[in-house]
Amino acid sequence: MIWQAWWTGFASLVHPAQLLLLALGMAYGLFVGALPGIGGATAIALAVPLTYGMDSFGAIAFACGVMGAVPMGSSITAILLNTPGAAPSAATLIDGYPLARQGKAGLAIGAAASSNAIGGLIGTMSVLVVMPLARRIVLLFRPPEFFLLGMLGLVVVALSSRGKMLRGLVTAGLGLMIACIGQDLVTGELRFTLGSQYLWSGVRIVPALIGLFAIAEMINLSIKGGAVVSNADARVKVERMSAGLIETLRHWPTVLRGSLIGTVVGAVPGVGGTVAAFLSYSITSQVSKQPETFGKGNIEGVIAAESAINASDGSHLIPTLGFGVPAGAEMAVFLGILMLHGLQPGPAMLIDHQAEIYGIVWALTFACVLASFIGLVCVRPLAAITTVPTRVLVPIVVCLALVGSYSVDQSIGNVIVSGVFGVLGYVLIRQDYPRLTIVIGMVLGGIIERSYHQSLMMSDGSWGIFVASPIAMTLAALIVAALVVPPARLAVRKAMGA
Amino acid sequence: MPAAARTFVVPAAIWLVTAAFIISASRLGPVARAMPLLVGWLTLLLVTLDIVARTGTPVGRALTSALNPAALTPADAQATGSARAFRVGLAPILALIAGFTLIGALPSVPVFVFASLRWHAQRGFLTSAVLAVAVTLFVYGMFYKVLQLPLYPGLLFGGAWQ
């Protein structure tokens, strides 16, 4: 059964139309990934409208192409220009940029590309191993467990907003409030629609995501202004990339360690590639015989960070597809694409759409590996992209984002929603509130509310059902621990320090 | 407004929105209001804690230290509401949305791109015009021709308001 789904997923991808879409997604991902400030979530949010005319496999191929290629585009500019396209590549530039300044940019990019590819391969392969187990586990879950799992996902994501747990929880609450807009799931009663028929079916997730990520980032870039880097910086010499590939193979324990760290860390919702990359970098420098060389151009630093970044991107699929809990902002947008194409991640998808699940895994595997090699070929044009002034880029991206938002279901309400969420997203950026939790709240709101009502119906209104089974008790204990342990640990540390 | 007071603007706005949400939810039927009230009260509690954490009182400092160690500086908050931020970042996008709604996608896209490039990005007339036309052709070609998705005609030209 599972082998058949693996094969169907693979066969659906190895089709000229799908491969073309995968390649187009990769080209777009490399291009946008190289643009600092855009990041994976914005890149994929902008790509959503392009998937409208595609079937579910086509949309999956295109989106996975984008997700697989963004890290490579981002790493190239991190190494060459000391400017990461996305946050995780900040760990790459610690040693990548010094190598480029020493005239070894080719070595660093070659190593980054190859470790990126191996990390991606290990990360996505872990999904192939875990998914059959996830399917068995998910079948043990009933509404109370799903309610608690949704709450745990929200709390974990809020906690992962390092140093901003309270603000993360506030925006998670906002996300849940937004998810309450529209017809009540049980009674059909209209809630918070402000007299607008458009809001009867709730706030559409894709226009809201386009606003929160694409429009908000554009407002932010527009206010900052200027070009990302100077033309002079973009003309760094790039030679000896093949030597980088050899270095990666020579440092195979570093690749393996980084990939495993990325795989494990990436499977935890909210703990994204940035944590994985820095954790891998930090452990590698600690176990190294020459820790003093890190930060001054040690190739192992590049390899450790890059293998972890792509591995975490692959394992993000585990909570996203298995439980419908997006592992990060990029996965939340990807989840929006899947929903747009009639796929609802979670238990139903694990049972009814296994071919699509394995299609995603294969597409991401292909994209991670191929994008690394395409990235090597396109190093110079990608570096040149960053010299485009942001004020030229912003109006073009904003227009495409709004036209795309309208196209979701040809409603002008979508454009207004994108505008409102764009302003909201910008305010959240400036006030240092995490945006990811608002998205997770919006995505999980429906599941949480539905499970809540179903649970209370099952128990005739008794809240005891939320701690009635061993799984529910474990999840409830994890929620309490997640909320209590970090502040308690801080307090203990302070007391000990005093 | 003093810089320190600006740090309270956004949490205070969230507090007010949440309070309005709770009042509105309490008018719903018993089943429909169950989750909104639960979420609303929890959010109100959290945002109240966030406001207290910003006060600089001993309780506020303790809250910040335990739950929000990466606290926002008053300087960051000052930049948020500046007139320049509104003029440069928000106003053009709000104008585009208004144009999009009133006159539709095809006229508002070239006007917005041209105006942004010519006056905000300080590009030459020809460069701005060429880029404006190119973006409009891309929008028309990609969305209307390739994806066969209609472009909004605008309220003034028969577009639906929904």
Image (cartoon, coloured by chain):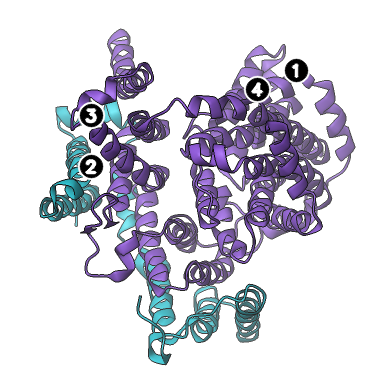
Question: Badge 2 local density, few (<14 within 10 Å), some, or many (20+)?
Answer: many
Q: Nearer the viewer, mark 4 or mark 1?
A: 4
Q: Chain of mark 1?
A: A
Label located before the other in sequence (1 or 3)? 1
For marks 4 and 1, give the CA distance: 10 Å
Colour of chain A in the rendered structure image: purple
Q: How many angstroms separate mark 1 from mark 3 (CA)?
A: 52 Å
* Identity, as a three-letter code, of the amino acid under mark 1: Pro
Tag nearer the camera, 3 or 2:
3
Q: Colour of chain B?
A: cyan
| Residue pointed to by mark 2 | B39
Q: Which mark is residue A459?
A: 3
Task: Please report, as a chain letter, where disc 3 is located.
Answer: A
Do marks 3 and 2 share a chain? no
Q: Nearer the viewer, mark 2 or mark 4?
A: 2
Determine whether the residue tagged by mark 3 lies in a helix, strand or loop. loop
Residue A34: tell me if it is visible.
no
Q: Secondary structure at mark 1?
A: helix
Marking on residue A260: 4
Disc 2 marks which amino acid?
Answer: Val
Q: Earlier in the sequence, mark 4 or mark 1?
A: 1
